[in-house]
Image (tube, rainbow, N blue to C red):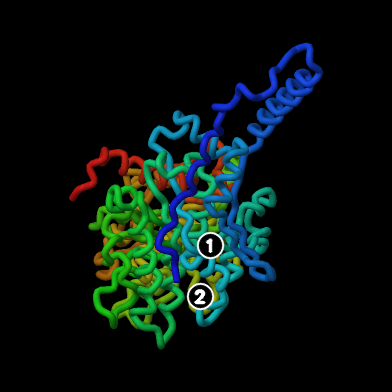
Amino acid sequence: MLPNSNNPPSKPKSPDFSDRKNSFLLSFHNPRTWLILTLLLFQILLLFTLRSHPFSAYITFHPHSSSPPLSLPTESSAAVHADSSSTITQVDNVTDLCPLGKIYVYDLPLFFNAELIQNCNELNPWISPCEALSNDGFGREATALSNSIPESLIRSWYWTDQFALELIYHNRMLNYRCRTLEPELAATFYIPFYAGLAVGKYLFKNNSSAKDRDLHCELLLNWIQNQTYWKRTDGWDHFISMGRISWDFRRSKDEDWGSSCIYMTGMRNITRLLIEKNPWDYFDIGVPYPTGFHPSTADDISQWQNFVRHRERKTLFCFAGATRGFIKNDFRGLLLNHCYSESDSCRVLDCAGSKCSNGTSEIMETFLDSDFCLQPRGDSFTRRSIFDCMVAGSIPVFFWKRTAYYQYEWFLPGEPESYSVFIDRYAVKNGSSIKAVLENFSKEEVKSMREKVVENIAKIVYGKPNDGINGVKDAFDIAVEGVLKRIKRHGGDYKW
């Protein structure tokens, strides 16, 4: 049975000094006076020393550990740390660092996040995702890339799963510089519900029902709507990260795919960060898929940018993907055939089987060696490959505007032609040559587009430190600040 509410701990009452007259009188001629003054001075020095050490909270998952794999701090335990002049408390006292307001992170019942990770073996009927969800959602280290990238940057690369967004955002939110432990000080509220993992658990089970796929979301919304700060605005100042595409949460009929989470009462007003949004839903925000690159410092980003900027590229364009035989007139199959027929200019990586799975370096090498990378729609309008391609400094070629231009406006340059190429898919179906289009760009134009891609890398990756990359705004920072700006624009008018 889930608790009906999770009210924040009450503040301790101030000590009563009304009876101070009965205490002993301090006298400088009394030895006890000097003892007390010495102890007081020591406490003041200790307080200033503690303030110089930041507080950090982590979600840590060890798939082979016998202890509980995920430990989320409760608000009561975090409040104890806050009394020790933690970074969070310092931020509460320095509002200039958070001009858009502060964020309160709900301490949900473990059923909605930690238990899903603890029981990670149940999330996929074919293969355990436990390893992919380790290292705070980054996955295991990508040591197999050691022959493809600079040795100094190997520590920044992981085999990150494309559906690990919820873990990554939760970790960062717990350590966000503008997080507050006091909900009355918050401008917005983050709900750390792992909606994507919850529904993904049932998507590929033959015997799962619509009720199974809706269970976690229904219970979460029942819980959140009983919270005091939800009731103030009916959820307008709340947001959530959902680690799958929007369509996985938009089931209209019981026999259809996915859950009906987004259509449920209570979800209507919540801002949703998704790897693919519905462009016509104001509350959907498209954020970058997680890639394998998780830099720790600004220097890591600069080193990587220089590496891909000066990389010698041997191929005009490439395509990494697999056909979808169940789709009539599959466009990806058309691109594969197109590339095979232009083998002198196009590098093909047929991802049938496990060639493109995490643990191999072939995708990275394909993108690093090509000026352009073909990016058709995936199983939905978007695909993670867009961001893998751009992180490698390759220029994306799109065939649907909804693949990127109408999805990730906060993260990609406003002028699509400055960093990408658009080719109408119907022209390709009618026989137009992709090679001819791409060869038409001069070397200077290609260089300019690549530079725009390289400049933008920091905005489409998720940094490794739980408290962010000093001096750099990554995809997380941009997403959260964007949410804060939207909520601030409402100005307290939370009505349709």
> Residue furthest toward the top?
29
Task: Check disc 2 and give the amino acid type.
Answer: Leu
At label 1, counting other C-alpha atoms closer than 10 Å, the crowd grade (few under 14, some 14-19, many 20 or more) is: many
Q: Residue furthest bottom?
A: 207
Q: Residue at x 44, y 74 (%)?
A: 322
Depth-wise, is mark 2 or mark 1 nearer the camera?
2
**Mark 2: few/some/many CA within 10 Å (<14, 14-19, 20+):** many
Locate residue 284: give its quadrant: bottom left
Q: Which residue is mark 1?
A: 366
> Of residues 124 and 41, which is closer to you in this image?
41
In screen coordinates, is 390 left or right of 246? right
Left or right placement of residue 479 versus residue 126 in this view: left
Q: Which amino acid lies under the numbered mark 1 shown in the image of this protein?
A: Thr
Identify the secondary structure beneath mark 1: helix
| Residue 360 image offset from top left, x and y in percent | 60, 68
User: From the viewer's perspective, is residue 110 above or below residue 269?
Assistant: below
Residue most toward the right?
A: 31
Q: Does residue 4 sit above or below 303 in this rendering?
A: below
Residue 425 at least partly seen: yes
Task: Between residue 113 and residue 437, name the one nearer to us.
Answer: 113
Kindly identify which numbered label has been placed on residue 123: 2
Residue at 40% over, 41% down: 184
Can residue 388 be seen here? The reply is no
Residue 62 location, x and y as percent?
Answer: 65, 65
Numbered disc 2: secondary structure: loop
Q: Quadrant of the N terminus?
A: bottom left
On the image, the x and y values in percent for residue 357 come to: 54, 71
Nearest to N terminus: mark 2 or mark 1? 2
Q: Residue 30 location, x and y as percent?
A: 79, 16
Q: Residue at x 66, y 64 (%)?
A: 144
